[in-house]
Every structure is written in structure tokens, then in C-alpha cells.
Amino acid sequence: MRTLALLGLMWAMPAVAAECRSEAFEDKPYTICEVDLAKERLELFLADDTGEPYGYFGNVNAALGKQGQKLGFATNAGMYHEDRRPVGHYLENGREVQKVIPNAGPGNFGLLPNGVLCLREGRADVFETLDYQKENPQCRSATQSGPMLVIEGALHPRFLPDSTSRYIRNGVGTTPDGQRAVFAISDAAVTFHEFGRLFRDHLGMRNALYFDGNISRMRAPDLGRSGIGFTTLGPIIGVIEQAD
């Protein structure tokens, strides 16, 4: 993937951090982290310069540390195969690893409509996949996952209020101006309908995207949350900060 050394040369890292907090919605606990794209550098990470997947937040943090930087908030950013290759579209600093997959398929990823998180300079946007293809935004980096949680203010049409399928879940929503990305992970098992309502009704997101389920983890240093786990991850998204 892209050389982390270039990140240090190209961009000055702001001295702010994502705002993370723990709160409840409908008696379910969540950890929520908000990123201000005008002030913070949000990046995708998949593999190091040798092609070896990072797998863990600590490996990304160690690589950044060699450049006088560190990883702040981070979470897993989309579904992946056993070898940690992304299931859907993946673009990292201009290099495409996986093309867009627009068709339906098995599992949550294929539960259309799904979507793409697009990172551009100073903004982040969640697009429904067909809109992403039609609009063709010039993303610096992008990751596709699914299903969409909220689509233009409406919950995904396949979500059932009385579903019994409950898992730890994580995802992201973005504001219409692209200036704020809001990430959330459930700290207890929730349904898709409950998780979608969190983004729509509690966080006020008109568009939000599901990342993954039981393997989901979040790094929130200000909350003492490291995100350490036994399962290796595929795509990771996080904020780059200046080292102390």
C-alpha cells in the first residue's frame, strides 16, 4: 500500500483528536467517535510497504511512530476475506485494490443497497453504491461495505423491527456537507434496525454505512480503549495525529 513516510512529508498533522464518548440510546450502550474533517486527517490502512496486512491497530500505530506520528481513534472499515483482502471496493491514496461490486450477493455485504465511504481532501461522504458509480466522486481513498444503514434519511428497507439477529456492530455516518464523520460501535449486541435508528434518530445522520459485526473493534485512546483483540482485521480507518 502507500508509503507511510510520504504521509509525514506531504501533510502537517493537526494537533486535535477525534472526540469519543460512551452513551446509551434506547437502553443500549455505544461508543461514538466524531471526526472533524476540516481539522483531522482520516486515513484508510490495509497493508504495509511489503504487502503484509496490518491486521491490528497496534501495527498501524507502530508504522506511524517511525514517522513521528501516531494512530488516534480507529476502527475496522469493511468486510474482508480470510486473507484480509477487502470484499468490496477499496481505494487507498489513489491505488485501487478492489473494484466496485454493484450486484447483490450472499451475506450482509450483498444485502442491497450497500455503500461506499469516500475520503476526499477535507471531507468524507457515505454514498449508496449505485450513486457512487453514477457521481464518480474523485476520492483519495474509499471503502465499500454493506448494507447501508440509513439512505437519505430512511432506514434500509430490509431491516425488521422485530428481528432476533443481534451482534456487536460498527458503522459510520456522514453529514451532508462532508465535514463530519461519526463512527459508532455497539457495546452490546443489537439488531440492524436498532443500529440504524442510532444513526438516524440519535445521531441525525441522513446517510450511514454498516462496516461489520462480531469482529468489530474500536480504538479510542481518550476512553482508555485500545481495541486489542485476537482476530486480525482487514481494512482499518483512523485518525493520524502528531506523536507526543
Image: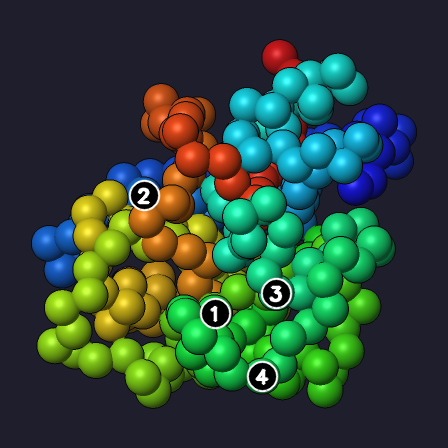
Q: Are marks 2 and 1 in contact (CB under 8 Å)?
A: no
Residue furthest front in the image: 82
* Res. 193 image quadrant: bottom left
Residue type pointed to by label 4 = Asn
Q: Is residue 211 above or below residue 35?
A: below
The secondary element bearing badge 1 is classed as: loop
Q: Is residue 107 left or right of residue 135?
A: left
- Of 49 and 20, which appears nearest the observer? 49
Q: Is residue 53 above or below residue 197?
A: above
Depth-wise, is mark 2 or mark 4 nearer the camera?
Answer: 4
Q: Residue at x 56, y 78 (%)?
A: 128
Earlier along the polypeptide chain: callout 1 or callout 4?
4
Q: Is residue 242 above or below residue 109?
A: above
Q: Are marks 1 and 3 in contact (CB under 8 Å)?
A: yes
Residue designated by label 2: 31
Q: Is residue 100 visible?
A: yes
Residue designated by label 1: 109
Residue 209, image x, y percentages? 47, 66
